[in-house]
Amino acid sequence: MYIDNEIERIRQKYHNQPEFVQSIEEVFCSAKPLIEAHPEYQKADLLHRMAEPERMFRFRVVWTDDEGKVRTNVGYRCQFNGAIGPYKGGLRFQKNINESIIKFLAFEQTYKNALTGLPIGGGKGGSDFDPAGRSEDEIMRFCQSFMTALYRYIGPDIDVPAGDMGVGRKEIGYLFGQYRRLKGNFENGVITGKGLSYGGSLIRPEATGYGAVYFLNEVLKHENDKLEGKRIGVSGYGNVAWGIIKKAAELGAKVTYMSGPDGYVHDEEGICTKEKIDFVQELRLTDPLHCKPYADRFGCEFVPGKKFWGTKDVDIYMPAAVQNDVDEVSAQKIIDSGVKYYIEVANMPTTAQALEMLRGCKDIIVAPSKAVNAGGVGVSALEMSQNSERLSWSEEEVDELLHLMMKNIHKNSMIAASEFNLGYDLVAGANIAGFKKVAEAMMEQGVF
């Protein structure tokens, strides 16, 4: 009753923030067996406290475009939960950014970060600024204005932003440069995703995709299956999809479907040669809106304006683009396709109803993004460690630590699910494991 009442209160209070509500419902409902086993959580009003960010900043970002016109955007930073460590999470620059999206991302980040086993709390930020079509100078001026509003509230032991959609190494460089200018010192642990010349970590751009493949490999091992020879459909072709493509090819699998805002590409031979992988890397940097140039270059099929969910010639689906990409219609197509593995990679890529359908299909194994995409923030935390020790680890060292991290996340998710007799339910297991760690830290630190 306590959990149901709390979820209903959240629905009523945040009825106009659907992404945020969906994220809370998934975590709290999954963790219900754990919560019911700890009546002291109710006395401490734990769920209410968990559902409210510790701080939420909203600020204006004023900058001047190349024609001399003054522009005004809205910036956000949500410092959701710092019970485990400094707030950690990316900055997202997209025209559809609003408070609900930022809060849902920050809430998800809290439990994702807990799963890594590293001492980092959860946060997220961004702006409704769209860098697509903007000049280098315009992006630089916007980033400088954004950081001027934000810099007072972040720091290596307070809040450590990183990149996300619309915020790559270029934007991180401009943001860090402005932070250094304003602070007058070199706090290189305040931002991650930096360039290698000033404190960045090797394989950070690929880390989320690499980690997703490592997690997938653990799922396949559990099923006495193997990655080699598998055909994968990946939505998106940005950093995350690119990392999946690279690591899958390295381990003997191949991505045969890749999508963008303009439609999808079907490369029956697989995106697995160096030439093809390098072209995807170039495309993600130069044209974030069209994947058709890949089909034109390599003479493969391109289907405009469509999604590939439901195709029967893949073994694994990995939605790696945007939230709510897979709705009930797409979920039914996926079920009908007979595919066995549905591995979420993007943050909340599946609507609540679609996820319920997929989880209810006994023939499909569903892995949640909260666990699968934790490798990105994990390597960001490793970058923080390198910065604090004034070290630079090799690519092999970072990759080995990432691989171990993803194996542990899979193992801990399995253990958490089995503890409550939930079988091989990775969605419930990941939510329970993340919730448990955050809850223990909050309870041990008292009420505040």
Image: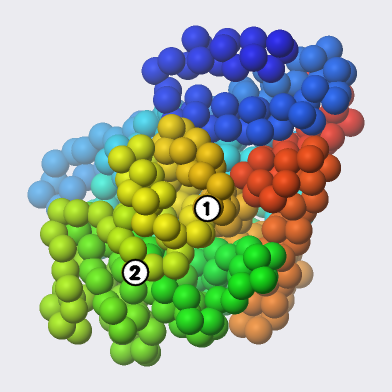
Element type where label 2 sits in the image:
loop
- Residue 56 visible (yes or no): yes
Give amino acid for label 1.
Ile
Residue at x-position 80% and y-position 50%: 415
| Left or right, 27 with reference to 342 | right
Few, some or many residues within 10 Å of mark 1 (<14, 14–19, 20+): some
Residue with the mark numbered 1: 364
Residue with the mark numbered 2: 313
Q: Nearer the viewer, residue 339 or 269?
A: 339
- Residue 112 visible (yes or no): no
Residue at x-position 21% and y-position 45%: 64
Of pointers 2 and 1, the one earlier in the residue sequence? 2
Q: Position of residue 129 (x, y in %)?
A: 29, 43
Q: Position of residue 368 (x, y in %)?
A: 56, 49
Residue at x-position 15% and y-position 54%: 305
Q: Position of residue 223 (x, y in %)?
A: 65, 65
Give amino acid for label 2.
Asp
- Whether tag 2 and tag 1 are in contact, CB under 8 A, the answer is no
